[in-house]
Amino acid sequence: MPAQQLAGSRIREKRLDRGLKQAVVAEIVGISPSYLNLIEHNRRRIGGKILADIARALDVDASLLIDGVDAALLDEMRHAAALLGPDVEVEKAEECAARYPGWSALIATQSRRITALQTQVQALSDRMTHDPALAAALHEVISTVSAIRSSSSILVGPEHLDDDWQRRFHHNIHDDSLRLAESSEALISYLQAPEAQSDTAMSAFEQMESWLAQSGFHLPALEKGGADTGAFVKASGLTGASAALLKAHAEVYAEDAVALPLAKFEKACRAHAYDPAAIAQHFFQPLPRVLRRLACLPPEAGHPPMALAVCDAAGVLTFVKPVPGFSMPRAGGACPLWPLFLALNRPGQPIRLEVALPGVNASHALCYAVATVRDATHFDVPPAVQSIMLVVPDPETNLGAPQPVGVACRICPRSDCASRREPAVSGVSVQTAL
Amino acid sequence: MGKRVLLIEDEPNIIEAISFILSRDGWTVHTHEDGTTAMDKVLGFPPDMIILDVMLPGRSGFDILRDLRGNDTTKDLPVMMLTARGQEKDRELALRLGANHFMTKPFSNSEVRDFVRDLIGA
């Protein structure tokens, strides 16, 4: 539904947020309650004086009622509020985003940055705590310093020391000073290694996804058979863990491209209206491959935008390709109601489900998910289960009542969710589902 | 002859420095550098106290301390842990396992001497 036609829904949400009855607002505005009801259900177009009067009655900016706000931006702002604590006026997020889009985008950017830095701090903390090479290097330095301190204290102490002992401790200090120089240099070299210098403001996954996003996740260099994935990764400039992840992604991408050549695949997509099941049957290829291929179609070729998420058996997101303006499950606390996670309970059974994100700017999306067991070729080895989900925002098909989902519990306003794992940040309306 | 201190430590110059300090203070100091055979050394040479490094070749000082506390002969033996690992969790672990004191490197000589005096001094 076009944004302008949702003005009525936004009016209804704002009125309910403020606890006002239709009759009260209608009286203030000078229209009948039944006419306001038609407006709220988007059955009457609205503008001009009535819009201005309703906005004034609800104490909101009229542009907010007309234009709405990017749902993904709102989620980012609510996430920022969740990071900063309970004193933020979360219920004003939408108004803030409408009135001050630049500042709101800055808040969202800062929030992402904080989250990335928290990830970096955690990674560095883990490294300091668990990296055996670093622990050994530090131990060597501290041990040598201890020996020097102890020996030198003996030398400068008030008690007499005969010449032999003096020579001995001088000699020890000299040896230890050489060791200290070597171990210090080794430590500095270690800390300056490429792995430590990498741009860990983002996690390795985020670095890879950020790099892939520059090309819209479509990789022409891997479309032809026999692609050299090693050279591809080298040319990317990524290093360390992010390069390893890109290599794994590139190898799967190249295999998918061979199995589903781009020109034929695009043709089949259009012929089958982007229905993954029909395309899979057309090519006799597994659904996960088709879902991955659909998400990586060339962005400039007129295909509908499609997002992709992949998770492991623990529900940890291992890959996310977003689409602008649509909120995908958030790593580290994603809503468990997404079909991506539901599929984990039914490996091998494809799930097609329409979902709706909360709020009046509710985005709908059609999700295709399937969980599969990879490499099930050995006995007595735990299976590696992976779930994959293709997300098609604003679908034209209508599968009936959509499955309510959220981005993450802390920023989700749904009050009646049996799957909630933690409270939402304060101030988020719990009446939006009315 | 003074009471016997067994220093289990693998850093030669620390061994020499501590041995010198304690010997000069009247203690008889024996040393051992290997974690794997440390318990054999303790049982073969019952000391009056042990100064025990945590990071030793073969076996950690924590494991050795656990064995000491589980052995009737050595369960009450005063033990001072000496380590470059100064994290709180290491200190807590050492004390939970029954260490009498936990000292981090780099240490001061007088600190070591004073604690030995406190633990086994007359």
Image (cartoon, rainbow, N blue to C red):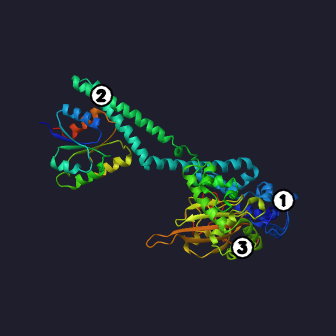
Q: Quadrant of residue A302?
A: bottom right
Q: Which quadrant of the figure contains the C terminus of chain A?
A: bottom right
**Secondary structure found at label 1:** helix
* In-image side of A57 versus A199 (left or right): right
- Among the two numbered marks 2 and 3 on one chain, the one whose residue lies closer to the N terminus: 2
User: How far apart in space, not on screen, are marks 1 and 3 (Cα)?
Assistant: 41 Å
Q: In the rendered image, which residue does mark 1 sit on? A: A51
Of labels 2 and 3, the one closer to you: 2
Q: Quadrant of residue A205?
A: bottom right
**Secondary structure found at label 3:** loop
Relative to the observer, which residue lies in front, A272 or A282?
A282
Relative to the observer, which residue lies in front, A310 or A300?
A300
Q: Which quadrant of the figure contains the N terminus of chain A?
A: bottom right
* In-image side of B66 versus A108 (left or right): left
Picture residue at 72% right of the left edge, 58% below the top: A325
**Secondary structure found at label 2:** helix
Question: Badge 3 sits on which subunit?
Answer: A
Q: Are marks 2 and 3 in contact (CB under 8 Å)?
A: no
Q: In the rendered image, which residue does mark 2 sit on? A: A171
In x, y percent, where is residue A422?
55, 62
Above/below status of A301 relative to A178: below
Is residue B13 visible to us here?
Answer: yes
Q: In the rendered image, which residue does mark 3 sit on? A: A275
In x, y percent, where is residue A169?
28, 28
Above/below status of A85 relative to A265: above
Q: What mark, if any, has residue A420 been given in the picture? A: none
User: How far apart in space, not on screen, are marks 2 and 3 (Cα)?
Assistant: 79 Å
Number of residues whose C-alpha sits closer than 10 Å to that of mark 3, classed few (under 14), some (14–19) or many (20 or more): some
Let me know if marks 2 and 1 both belong to one chain. Answer: yes
In x, y percent, where is residue A94?
71, 55
